[in-house]
Image (cartoon, helix red, strand yellow):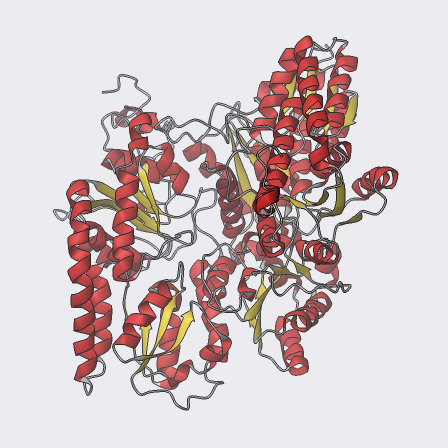
């Protein structure tokens, strides 16, 4: 009863956040930057920020996560962090030898007014950036938005600071990855190949945060979107942004800078979102959907039909990030399940509107809150008042699942106590089938556990 | 071995893909031209410029300068260190019946939510995450109101025994008067509300320890010391990870000694308040709590001793050293001897199997505090292993002098290291095991060597006599695991 202190009565809180369903911007920027090949993320702030982000990402991926820090001291906080950043750029290129340094700010450097654009320009003017190397930046104040915002800002930075328009279109499409796992990004690339289109996927953390054991500790694993690919994104025919919060800002920036038209889609989690993704590729690239993809879809639909009886009416509470929650909620509704409570700490009017619209149409009674005080404490209170059959969310959900004794599926970021997310996708028809299998296992295992002896059945 | 000019001859450089760049390497301030890299001793290269004095390889034949430490990290290094806030947070975290409110943007509270396995036998308020989640408007107009409201809401909701309020980086900049808010709330609610000045940039993790001790010092002396035995101690710097404080407490209680407060493992506010009634302070994690011990000595005249509960030798000594302080009660020493003899009688034979398998194996140690390193070196030796790399994030001058004295010839000693250095030295010295924390673990596994977490994430008690057994077992299991036969090890040879 770890959360024994959670009271059932929901009171309006004005200041306090308890058990947050979000974290701060810089970690998202760090994660995104790891999806560029040969890139060392750099945290412009106190040492602790970088340490916490690396620890969290290390726990989530069980992989070494490299990032440098400006190591702010009191002096830097009074006189500004420019000297620290310039010294850091020297040190990093001399010792760690990345192709790219991706600098993100923190609440500290933002509050004292450090201007990363001006500082990176100064570094360039002072000749601190060797030939063929790059320093990009993203402003990621921790007191605005959430980790998802930080991710979006860094991905936008990739688009604005790398993309070039040569005037000659290339026969390729950009797929801008919303916050997803290396496994999901790998699956996107596989699907594009099967569909027969050339893509630039960015960022791309596959082969970076799911690297094999080789007996070596490699600072820059082989994966990640290359600089050449990022530059060429300005010449692509069109962009598909997967996720309106985490990916669309980059697509907008790319349209503005290089006139690459874009379409925003949900991350392809579940049947409907994957359908839209496949159809969008088909439409924009003028390719037909290959047999292989249609068969994959058929298999997913087959299982959805076979197992519908075990899922209908099951009540679900979920929490996480906007771009995952939207398609996931839709998938649950497609499965005839009932999303009862939905919480996201990430604020955003667009997301609010999209989710409300989905729920108004198909599940008007659902409790939904995002932004300030949309935390796990509130979700837990809701669950106490209206119990559920299943909880879906990141590792922190385990406390609620244990206290309320309900099945729990780990989904989202961070997952600190299980593996799998880096290796097996949750997107596309195959990934959705895996997600469906997880949901079924969780619910049927519980049914078995709770069944009276005479009701404990071989064939359920 | 390598023909390729651009790699040095050690082999390790190439293995980790580290290529020294022309003009970028300095040894003791001298720039080393590229042509000299070939054949250069491994330990001389790859050290960050400006870090030469924080790394040394023990060599008794020449006079060696002291290691430089207590410095802030170089900008741009991939340091394994954390910040002031982190130091305060880990020290106070185990106080289980207080609320811990992080005043700042959400991250600092999110990353420190239940990250330390500091076990409580009762309330578990410490395992929740509370934040004022400061927003842009709060940064502009100040966060005092939000802090006040949050505190009132929290205290109403949880009825804690006390509240700790942690300042984060920006609180130090926007000028919130935390002290005033805390005073006001304390007055209105009747519980101690203690500000912890832990702005991340205001020093190193050690300054965070001090800020935490400062908050504790305000509590100590506010409780009744009635009924406290003359034969009593406080245990400082024991955080009850995996229930270690319970094991240690039991030994002392068996000796007839009253443990007034454990700071802060399985901590309770009421116990902290009466800690000044103890006769002796026993300081285990020296890095975090020596300051508090000194303060208590000055203010309350309580002497302190430094101990360590890791390994047979240090564990036994920590019982004897306490017993010696109560000379008028020879039965206490007798009991200590009895405990040691009983424990060692069963422990020693059980370690021999591990020793047999591990003899000749080499270990690298990179942990938070230096005092732990001393114990680990002894503990590893007792199971046949030698230490080829020893380092810490926060050791001081004395620690490193002692470390140098303890280590074998050729052992590399580092302060505030980074993954490049660690990987290089591990490969060069042929370590079979790395002892470290969360960020070091995957590095060990990528290099194909065993790992033991001796930080926050240890899941089994490593302190006490039983802890030594657990430690040996963990090391044995990891180093001797069959998985390594499938993994290319130590730089690419299967």
- The picture places residue A172, in percent across and down from the top left corner, at 69, 13
Q: Is residue B384 visible?
A: no
Q: Residue furthest right?
A: A361
On screen, residue A93 above or below B244: above
Q: Residue furthest front?
A: A454
The answer to whether B251 appears left or right of A165 in the picture is: left
Q: Is residue B263 visible?
A: yes
Question: Total marks drawn?
Answer: 0
Residue at 83% across, 41% down: A363
Residue at 59% across, 28% down: A425
Where residue A327 sits, quadrant-wise, is: top right
Where the N terminus of chain A falls, by quadrant?
Answer: bottom right
Residue at 58% across, 55% down: B108
Out of B421 and A215, give the one closest to the viewer: A215
- The picture places residue A389, in percent across and down from the top left corner, at 68, 46
The answer to whether A156 appears left or right of B340 in the picture is: right
- The picture places residue B448, in percent across and down from the top left corner, at 33, 32
Out of A311 and B407, give the one closest to the viewer: A311
Out of B180 and A372, give the one closest to the viewer: A372
Q: Residue furthest left?
A: B61
On screen, residue B20 above or below A322: above
Where the C terminus of chain A falls, by quadrant?
Answer: top right
- The picture places residue A362, in percent across and down from the top left corner, at 85, 38
Where residue B163 sits, quadrant-wise, is: bottom right
């Amino acid at each position: 009863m770890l959360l024994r202190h959670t009271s059932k009565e929901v009171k309006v809180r004005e200041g306090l956040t308890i058990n947050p369903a979000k974290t701060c911007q810089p970690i998202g920027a760090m994660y995104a930057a790891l999806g560029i090949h040969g890139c060392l993320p750099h945290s412009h702030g106190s040492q602790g920020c970088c340490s916490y982000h690396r620890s969290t990402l290390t726990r989530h991926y069980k992989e070494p996560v490299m990032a440098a820090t400006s190591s702010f001291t009191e002096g830097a906080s009074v006189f500004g962090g420019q000297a620290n950043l310039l010294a850091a750029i020297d040190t990093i290129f001399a010792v760690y030898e990345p192709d790219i340094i991706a600098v993100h700010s923190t609440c500290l450097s933002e509050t004292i007014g450090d201007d990363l654009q001006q500082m990176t320009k100064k570094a360039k003017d002072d000749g601190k950036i060797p030939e063929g190397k790059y320093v990009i930046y993203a402003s990621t104040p921790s007191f605005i938005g959430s980790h998802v915002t930080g991710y979006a800002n860094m991905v936008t930075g990739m688009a604005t600071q790398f993309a070039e328009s040569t005037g000659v279109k290339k026969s390729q499409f950009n797929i801008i990855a919303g916050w997803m796992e290396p496994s999901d990004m790998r699956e996107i690339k596989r699907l594009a190949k099967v569909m027969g289109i050339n893509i630039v996927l960015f960022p791309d953390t596959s082969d970076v945060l799911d690297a094999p054991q080789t007996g070596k500790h490699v600072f820059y694993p082989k994966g990640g979107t290359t600089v050449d690919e990022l530059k060429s994104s300005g010449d692509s025919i069109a962009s598909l942004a997967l996720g309106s919060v985490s990916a669309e800002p980059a697509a907008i920036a790319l349209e503005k800078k290089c006139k690459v038209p874009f379409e925003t889609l949900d991350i392809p989690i579940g049947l409907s979102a994957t359908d839209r993704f496949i159809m969008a590729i088909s439409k924009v690239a003028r390719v037909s959907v290959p047999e292989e993809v249609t068969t994959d879809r058929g298999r997913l639909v087959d299982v959805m039909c076979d197992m519908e009886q075990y899922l209908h009416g099951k009540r679900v509470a979920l929490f996480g990030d906007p771009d995952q929650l939207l398609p996931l909620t839709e998938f649950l509704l497609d499965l005839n399940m009932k999303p009862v409570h939905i919480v996201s700490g990430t604020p955003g009017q667009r997301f609010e509107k999209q989710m409300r619209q989905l729920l108004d149409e198909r599940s008007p009674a659902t409790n939904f809150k995002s932004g300030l005080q949309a935390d796990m404490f509130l979700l837990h209170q809701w669950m106490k008042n209206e119990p559920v059959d299943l909880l879906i969310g990141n590792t922190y959900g385990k406390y609620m699942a244990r206290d309320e004794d309900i099945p729990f599926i780990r989904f989202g970021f961070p997952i600190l106590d299980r593996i799998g997310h880096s290796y097996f996708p949750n997107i596309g028809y195959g990934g959705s089938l895996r997600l469906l299998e997880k949901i079924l296992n969780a619910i049927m295992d519980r049914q078995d556990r709770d069944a009276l002896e005479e009701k404990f059945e071989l064939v359920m | 071995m390598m023909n390729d000019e651009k790699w040095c001859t050690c082999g390790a450089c190439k293995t980790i893909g580290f290529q020294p760049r022309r003009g970028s390497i300095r040894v003791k301030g001298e720039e080393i031209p590229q042509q000299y890299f070939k054949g250069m001793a491994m330990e001389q290269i790859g050290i960050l410029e400006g870090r030469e004095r924080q790394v040394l390889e023990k060599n008794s034949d020449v006079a060696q300068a002291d290691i430089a430490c207590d410095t802030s990290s170089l900008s741009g290094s991939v340091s394994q260190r954390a910040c002031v806030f982190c130091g305060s947070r880990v020290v106070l975290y185990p106080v289980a019946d207080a609320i811990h409110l992080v005043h700042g943007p959400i991250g600092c509270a999110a990353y420190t939510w239940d990250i330390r396995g500091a076990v409580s036998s009762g309330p578990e308020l410490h395992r929740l995450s509370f934040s004022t989640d400061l927003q842009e408007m709060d940064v502009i107009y100040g966060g005092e109101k939000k802090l006040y409201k949050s505190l009132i809401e929290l205290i109403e909701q949880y009825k804690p025994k006390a509240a700790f309020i942690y300042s984060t980086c920006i609180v130090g900049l926007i000028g919130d008067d935390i002290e005033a808010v805390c005073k006001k709330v304390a007055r209105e609610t009747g519980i101690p509300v203690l500000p912890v000045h832990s702005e991340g940039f205001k020093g190193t993790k050690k300054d965070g320890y001090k800020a935490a001790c400062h908050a504790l010092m305000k509590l100590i002396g506010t409780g009744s010391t009635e009924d406290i035995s003359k034969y009593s101690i406080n245990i400082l710097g024991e955080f009850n990870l995996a229930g270690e404080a319970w094991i240690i407490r039991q030994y002392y209680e068996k000796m007839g000694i009253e443990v007034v407060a454990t700071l802060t493992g399985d901590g309770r506010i009421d116990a902290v308040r009466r800690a000044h009634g103890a006769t002796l302070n026993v300081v285990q994690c020296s890095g975090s709590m020596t300051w508090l011990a000194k303060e208590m000595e000055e203010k309350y005249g309580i002497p302190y001793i430094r101990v360590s509960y890791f390994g047979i030798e240090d564990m036994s000594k920590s019982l004897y050293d306490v017993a010696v302080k109560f000379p008028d009660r020879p039965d206490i020493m007798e009991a200590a001897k009895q405990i040691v003899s009983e424990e060692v009688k069963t422990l020693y034979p059980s370690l021999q199997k591990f020793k047999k398998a591990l003899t000749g194996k080499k270990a690298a140690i990179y942990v938070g505090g230096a005092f732990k390193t001393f114990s680990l070196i002894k503990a590893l030796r007792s199971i046949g292993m030698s230490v080829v790399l020893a380092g810490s994030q926060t050791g001081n001058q004395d620690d490193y002098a002692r470390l140098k004295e303890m280590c074998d010839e050729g052992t590399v000693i580092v302060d505030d290291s980074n993954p490049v250095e660690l990987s290089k030295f591990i490969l060069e010295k042929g370590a079979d095991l790395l002892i470290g924390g969360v960020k070091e673990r995957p590095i060990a596994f990528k290099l194909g060597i065993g790992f033991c977490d001796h930080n926050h994430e240890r899941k089994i008690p490593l302190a006490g006599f039983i802890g030594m057994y657990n430690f040996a077992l963990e090391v044995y299991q990891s180093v001797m695991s069959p998985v390594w036969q499938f993994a290319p090890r130590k730089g690419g040879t299967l």
